[in-house]
């Protein structure tokens, strides 16, 4: 997939990544509104909870209306969420009202619509890449497309730092900038050849019943929970790393903390996804998943045990590299296992992005009780499940290569 040729699609993925701005917003809202870590993590909780509520109904709607309609619906709802803070006067010059939390509640409302829009875009966008991919190219192309999600995520770290240091504007300048990007994505997509793209894959009619029936498949459930864990891990680490750096090493959040966190976490994810899209031309997706999980474990262990700034920063960097391809690998491996059920699977898998709501909240509660560094035990325990998932897919890969009688025995064991 050439970048310029597929730029309208990549911009859609960039807009998806804007939802991840709720990660750095945790530390920024905590500092602006003088919140506890637990209360501040209500931002990702609200944003990602919508993934759990919207995704399956949207998967059914997509079967009737098509992916292009659903993509436009997601962009519209995302824009509504981005416009709300601007209407309420939060567009770079936030005058904090310390007498109430009304401003914070308005940000929560904005996050709710952003989460809904992001959920809708994820349901349509990920399988849409399959429609425009050649045979055997889906995992590689999805990793490349997901790298643009990382750009959207990165803006949540970079824009506040840049706008503060150059123009003395605060973090709410994110909203007009994100709005402009979403409008550009809408016009580029709808004036491109992709707006008339039809899937060539024959898929089953999706319904709520057919989605629920897939939950009887243990492999599907295992992979769904993998998405839940991964999304919770990414947002938990993205939202708590700036707080960790500020707490242990007094790195200012508004001046450099977000920039340092981005350069060591989302920048490695960005480059890792580009590298992954290349490596997947030679490596099996199951092998790549195993390598990625092992690298992520090493990074989290370093963060959890380090008492020195440079070791901690190195741990965050390694963690980002490990995380880079886990989501697109789990998603594409699952869809490729049952392509005729892509609408149902996409809805179910995107539902599990709701993990971004729960793990950061759990980590925030633990951080308030035992300390921010010790709270990284939550990511360490959670990544253990991803290791199990990697082992499961390695086993399935070897089953496909085994003799028929061995396949039958191993399938019974699974």
Image: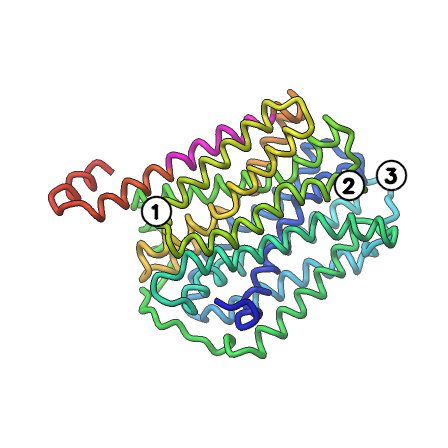
Q: Secondary structure at mark 1?
A: helix
Q: Nearer the viewer, mark 2 or mark 1?
A: 2
Q: Which residue is depicted at the point 42% across and 50% down? A: 329
Q: Earlier in the sequence, mark 3 or mark 2?
A: 3
Residue 158 falls inside the magenta stretch: no
Q: How many marks?
A: 3
Q: Secondary structure at mark 3?
A: loop
Please tell me which residue lies in front, 94 or 101: 94
The x and y percentages for residue 319 are 55, 37
- Residues packed near mark 3 inside 10 Å, few (<14), some (14 to 19) or many (20 plus): few
Determine which quarter of the picture holds residue 361. top right
| Rendered image: mark on residue 256 | 2
Determine which quarter of the picture holds residue 312. top right
| Rendered image: mark on residue 220 | 1
Residue at label 3? 99
Give the colour scheme of this rendering. Answer: rainbow
Q: Earlier in the sequence, mark 2 or mark 1?
A: 1
Residue interval drawn in magenta: 375-388
């Amino acid at each position: 997939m050439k970048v310029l040729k597929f730029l309208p699609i990549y911009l859609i993925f960039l807009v998806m990544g804007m939802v991840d701005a709720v990660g750095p917003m945790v530390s920024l809202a905590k500092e602006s509104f003088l919140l506890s870590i637990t209360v501040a993590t209500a931002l990702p909780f609200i944003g990602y909870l919508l993934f759990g509520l919207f995704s399956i109904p949207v998967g059914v709607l997509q079967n009737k209306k098509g992916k292009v309609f659903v993509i436009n619906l997601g962009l519209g709802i995302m824009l509504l969420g981005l416009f709300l803070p601007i209407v309420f006067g939060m567009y770079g010059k936030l005058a904090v009202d310390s007498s109430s939390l009304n401003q914070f509640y308005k940000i929560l409302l904005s996050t709710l619509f952003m989460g809904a829009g992001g959920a809708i875009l994820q349901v349509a966008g990920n399988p849409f890449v399959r429609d425009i991919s050649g045979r055997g190219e889906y995992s590689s192309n999805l990793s490349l497309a997901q790298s643009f999600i990382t750009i959207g995520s990165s803006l949540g770290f970079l824009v506040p730092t840049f706008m503060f240091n150059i123009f003395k504007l605060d973090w709410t300048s994110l909203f007009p900038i994100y709005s402009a990007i979403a409008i550009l994505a809408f016009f580029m997509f709808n004036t491109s050849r992709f707006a008339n793209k039809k899937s060539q894959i024959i898929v089953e009619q999706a319904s709520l019943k057919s989605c629920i029936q897939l939950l009887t498949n243990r492999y599907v459930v295992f992979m769904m929970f993998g998405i839940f864990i991964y999304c919770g891990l990414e947002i938990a680490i993205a939202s708590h790393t700036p707080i960790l750096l500020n707490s242990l090493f007094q790195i200012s959040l508004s001046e450099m903390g977000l920039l340092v966190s981005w350069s060591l976490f989302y920048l490695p994810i960005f480059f890792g996804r580009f590298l992954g899209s290349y490596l997947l031309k030679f490596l099996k997706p199951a092998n790549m998943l195993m390598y990625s999980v092992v690298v992520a474990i090493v990074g989290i262990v370093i963060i959890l045990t380090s008492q020195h700034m440079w070791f901690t920063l190195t741990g965050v960097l390694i963690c980002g590299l490990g995380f880079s391809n886990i989501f697109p690998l789990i998603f594409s491996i699952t869809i490729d296992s049952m392509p005729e059920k892509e609408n149902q699977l996409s809805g179910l898998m995107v539902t599990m992005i709701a993990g971004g709501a729960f793990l950061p909240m759990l980590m925030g509660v633990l951080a308030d009780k035992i300390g921010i560094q010790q709270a990284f035990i939550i990511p360490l325990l959670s990544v253990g499940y991803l290791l199990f998932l990697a082992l499961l897919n390695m086993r399935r890969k070897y089953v496909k290569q085994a003799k028929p009688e061995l396949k039958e025995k191993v399938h019974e064991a699974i």
